Amino acid sequence: MTDQTPAPFAGPKRVLSGVQPTGDLHLGNYLGALVKFARLQHEIPTFIFVADQHAITEWQDPAKLKGQVREITAAYLATGLDPKVATIFAQSAVPEHTELAWVFDCVARIGWLDRMTQFKDKAGKHKERASVGLYAYPVLQAADILLYKATHVPVGEDQRQHLELTRDIAQKFNHDFGAPGFFPLPDALTQGPGARIMSLRDGRAKMSKSDPSDYSRINLTDDAETISQKIRKARTDPDPLPASLDALEGRPEAQNLVGVYAALAGKAPQAVLDEFAGQGFGVFKPRLADLAVEVLGPIGAEMRRLLADPAEIDRILADGAARARALAQPTMAEVRKIVGFWNS
Ligand code: TYM
């Protein structure tokens, strides 16, 4: 190793991810993120939180916010996160997130944030009316991740740019403060056919909580009839399914539904085409609907069961917050020393 090569991070592997409590969770959230949380918890120590501080970058009704946090927690549990294995908590229960975010606000450059496409999408034409928090959103996200020195971050494709920014912040912090290897440069885990699930109404738009049409998405709480109906009505084209993935190019709706089937079945998209090549959507859609109901039906039912006992959810969140703080506090104490703060 030469003098110029920064020391690599030598700490243990750790998984961290989160979801904003800003509306019903949908199939994209499930296949892009939640399904991976449950899998990873058995391989690497896993920290999964509810991003209630990120949520208020756009107006949230204070009377509803705690309920929204419980709903996301119920979704985590219903999709297989085990609170005895993974650490599950609310972001606002660990004040070190925002403390570290301030330090990172002073590390990140305005030019870096100006490039963030999610801010541009969310702020729309009236950027000057967006909150400062919405602009600084990815910096808080970097703090969420690096506070736990997380090395792996399971997210959908849309978060890739935020993860690149997180790496840039980690690298600049380590360099500017002469703390080589202090923060890891975390990897985004975006592999698999579920990383970018598209709207059921438009195969070129992402499935999203904020799409005004409920028919654009399947919510985790939809009942079997609603799921089937949304799949029946999903936009498609008149051609049968082809034998090869290349032939799906230029057919975004068909490509999306094949991807959804693959992700729900835990198969490769090519294996789905091997099964359905030559068949039209009249055959494919009912099979997809059956599969979606089989996978999502029990999740919705389990969420409803868990939400009937909010005290138990709160107990799980309190326990998770204590475990998260036990890791966050020493990291933040080190950061205060590294920065040279009075309170270190
Ligand atoms: P959020 O709440 O928008 O979405 C939660 C997760 O769902 C993924 N996702 C999708 N995946 C596939 N197809 C889609 N159509 C789709 N829509 C959403 C997202 O990529 C995400 O993984 N900024 C994050 C929350 C966050 C966070 C963090 C994540 C805050 N701090 C630290 C990881 C680490 C967000 O808004 O996710």
Image: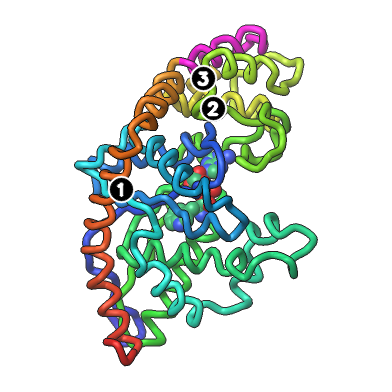
* Nearer to me, 13 or 20: 20
Residue at the image position 35 percent from the left and 37 percent from the top: 310
Give the mark nearer the N terminus: 2 vs 1.
2
Label 3: state its secondary structure: helix
Q: Quadrant of the C terminus?
A: bottom left
Magenta range is: 275-293
Disc sitting over residue 248 in the figure: none
Say above or below: 94 vs 265: below
- Magenta segment, principal secondary structure? helix
The residue that label 1 is drawn on is 317
The residue that label 2 is drawn on is 260
Q: Could you classify mark 1 by the number of other residues whose Cα lies within 10 Å: few (under 14), some (14-19), or many (20 or more)?
A: many
Does residue 212 appear in this view?
yes
Residue 215 in picture, x, y percent from top left? 68, 26
Disc sitting over residue 272 in the figure: 3
Residue 173 in picture, x, y percent from top left? 40, 80
Q: Quadrant of residue 226?
A: top right
Disc 2 marks a residue whose amino acid type is Val
Label 1: state its secondary structure: helix
* Nearer to me, 24 or 278: 24
Give the mark nearer the N terminus: 1 vs 3.
3
Q: Alpha-carbon distance for marks 1 and 3?
A: 39 Å
Is-magenta flag for residue 207? no
Residue 164 in picture, x, y percent from top left? 50, 63
